[in-house]
Amino acid sequence: MMRYRISEIKLDIRQSQEELPTAVRKKIKKKDLDIHDLKIIKESVDARKKPDIKKVYTLEFSCSQKLPLKEAAERKYQVPVADGSGKERPVVVGFGPAGMFAGLILAEMGLNPVILERGEPVEQRIKTVQKFWKDGILDPESNVQFGEGGAGTFSDGKLTTGIKDIRIGKVLEEFVEAGADPGILYKQKPHIGTDKLQGIVKNIRRKIEMLGGEIRFGNRLEDIKLSGENKAGERTLQQVEKVIVQKRKEDKSTELYELSTSCLILATGHSARDTFEMLRDHEAAMEQKPFSIGVRIQHLQKIINEAQYGDGSLADILGPAEYKLHHKCENGRGVYTFCMCPGGDIIDSSSEPETAVTNGMSGSARDGAYANSGLLVDVKTEDFRSEDPLAGIAFQKKYEKLAYRQGNGSIPETTYEKFRDDMTDPVRNSLPDFAVDSIVEAMPHLGRKLCGFDAPEAVVKAVETRSSSPVRILRDESGQSSIGGLFPAGEGPGYAGGIVSAAVDGIRMAEKAALVIFSEKPNI
Ligand code: FAD
């Protein structure tokens, strides 16, 4: 048997995948070809000739004949080998995608990691977040940003990423093993949905525990103890020796304890502002990073379907339509849509009291009546007007607090028409002037790219500040920060932007830690 890969196999969107073998035979003009173990490698949608839309496949299959096709060569991720004997257990901080996958790989290496997560397990976290959305009572330790599964647990669960990496296959396969639809392995724009994600993160937690890892919820990294000295003018020789953890008990009282470790993977996300401050106090090398600010905009999903498919009823076959828009303003700033949620809801994703922070989420069916997305404007480090590496966080906080006041204690809301025309509009007044001007300039251009996007009645809410980290914690080739044994991972330290890239970076940092601390070379 030979195994081949073939691309550009097209089906009409109404045809079923059962017809793929026939389409392959037709393409290579061999009516009697025996096709075995057909596997879809990629499925994308070609909507260039609306409403004549096609699904386009890349496939692998086995057959007994020699064909003039490319041979299939599947590359699979292999977990590195490590030796933990005589060493303390590695500590991972954060159980979002980066920490979860770092923890999983360390557990698969047999290193029995301890994972510290400040928030609650997902079952309790859901109740706490629902209470916040209903009564406005925020738990600063367990909310949309903090808790099992990290920032993306209440999300659309889009798995699209701009990176190319063999580790992506590992991440997607783990999601499928934990309960995701196998279609995520080949779809061009895979997504999971918040309802499914909540079960998936729980199943990955169980797998890590079965492999010897330990996850401690309600345990916040409070401080680190270092050995060695920080010699003036020289690269620091300091090394992580211990972590100090604040444990939250059931009655919400707290106690501190210490854990010895020479390996600390820090995957605390972009909202752990106290953790960034602690690292700045220890003089960990970090720098300001540009990010974005803006609003969430909402339209009727049927308007988006009509604009994208030419015929709105095609959404019944293709699913609710998505979009991604961009405009470069005359002031040099980019305005772009981000984290679009088809059939979803706008949510309050604050993690600190008296702040208003927007984001979006959808269920796996994406069957809500509305579509929303972040509508964001570039923020440059010059906008911070400070040299402090954490000045971007102060900038975010300023507008999050302003939005809360403008919304009289919750998320301010308006229409695009009022945002544009009314100088007293609460959403307009929740943003810096440059962001308002850029959005107003960009909207007619975006409306030309997607009919109806700039409709006067589009709903606009504020403020969207947490699309990426405003800080970068520097790390060297070995993955370590300026503090030895400290491996910053994921979105918080500025090395990822989304669920998949954060998970991949978590895996990468687990490999680096294995190489540096547990003295084995990764075998990929
Ligand atoms: P995080 O997910 O932020 O995880 C960090 C974890 O560390 C948290 O659980 C936190 O509680 C914990 N932590 C923080 N400080 C400490 C401490 N001191 N001690 C112990 N634990 C600590 N991305 C997508 O790709 N697709 C989407 O559809 C999508 N939708 C989103 C919707 C929403 C509402 C939000 C908020 C984000 C969304 N994102 C989406 C972004 C995505 O969630 C993040 O990019 C990703 O979660 C980053 O992963 P991470 O592991 O680096 O950090």
Image (cartoon, rainbow, N blue to C red):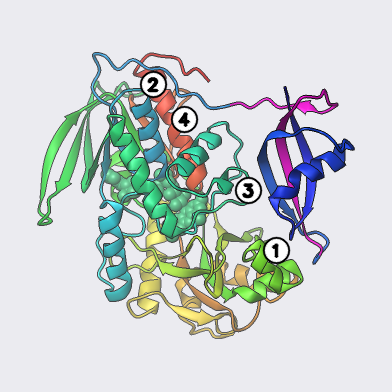
Of the residues tagged 1 and 2, which is closer to the observer?
2
The residue range painted magenta reads 52-75
Question: Foreground: 397 or 185?
Answer: 185
Kindly identify the amino acid type of the residue bearing the numbered disc 3: Lys
Magenta stretch containing residue 64, yes or no?
A: yes
- Quote the CA–CA distance across marks 3 and 1: 37 Å
Quarter of the view holding residue 198: bottom left
Q: Position of residue 441 (x, y in %)?
A: 67, 71
Residues marked 2 and 4 touching at CB (< 8 Å): no
* Residue type beneath disc 1: Glu
The answer to whether mark 3 is within 8 Å of ligand 1 is no
Residue tagged 3: 187
Q: Is mark 4 within 8 Å of ligand 1?
A: no
User: Which numbered mark, 4 or 3, is in the foreground of this view?
Assistant: 3
Image point 54% across, 37% down: which residue? 168
Residue 62 shows in the view: yes
What residue would you read off at disc 1? 330
Residue identifier under label 2: 514
Res. 229 image quadrant: top left
- Tell me which label, 4 or 3, sits earlier in the chain: 3
Frontmost residue, 457 versus 167: 167
Assess whether mark 3 and mark 2 are in contact (beta carbons under 8 angstroms). Answer: no
Q: Secondary structure at mark 1?
A: loop
Which of the pair 7/492 is nearer the observer? 7
Sooner in the amino-acid sequence: mark 1 or mark 4: 1
Residue occupying image coordinates x 76% and y 42%: 21
Label 1 CA crowd tier, 10 Å (few <14, some 14–19, many 20+): few
- Asked if the stretch drawn in magenta spans residue 87, the answer is no
Residue 508 is labelled as 4
Please give left or right for residue 57 compared with residue 343 in the image. right
**Sequence-first tag of 2 and 4:** 4
